[in-house]
Image (tube, rainbow, N blue to C red):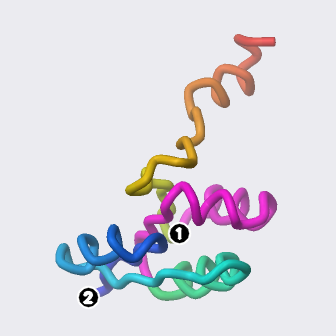
Amino acid sequence: MAVPVYLGDEVSAAGYRLAGARVRTPHAGEEGAALAWACSQAPLVLVSATVAAAIGDAALRTALSALAPLLLIVPDLQGEVPLPDLAARLRGQLGLEA
């Protein structure tokens, strides 16, 4: 049975580990490689907002748009990096906002 993977800070990773997820806390500059590893290992990848911000836009967009694995950006413990505003993005794509 495949288990989810969490990429983020050590404190949050401890909680995800207790919930049964595999975790990885990438060092600065290793975020893209950690995402590639996680996508090859799990059906569900949870990425903290801080790690997601450090991953290149192209790699993150590719991973988010892939059918598998499911990739979710989750809030980090410190809340220093805001989550992407999905509603605003969708309104812009639909032409509801300028």
Q: Position of residue 52 (x, y in %)?
A: 61, 61
Q: Is 51 placed above or below 83 here?
A: below
* Residue 20, quarter of picture: bottom left
**Which circle's residue, 2 or 1, is located before the other in the chain?**
2
Q: Secondary structure at mark 1?
A: loop
The stretch of residues the image draws in magenta is 42-68
Q: Which residue is mark 1?
A: 68
52 falls in the magenta region: yes
Q: Which residue is mark 2?
A: 1
Left or right: where 91 falls relative to 13:
right
What amino acid is at disc 1? Ala
Q: Position of residue 83 (x, y in %)?
A: 53, 43
Left or right: where 42 falls relative to 33:
left
Q: Is 94 placed above or below 18 here?
A: above
* Residue 21, quarter of picture: bottom left
Q: Secondary structure at mark 2?
A: loop
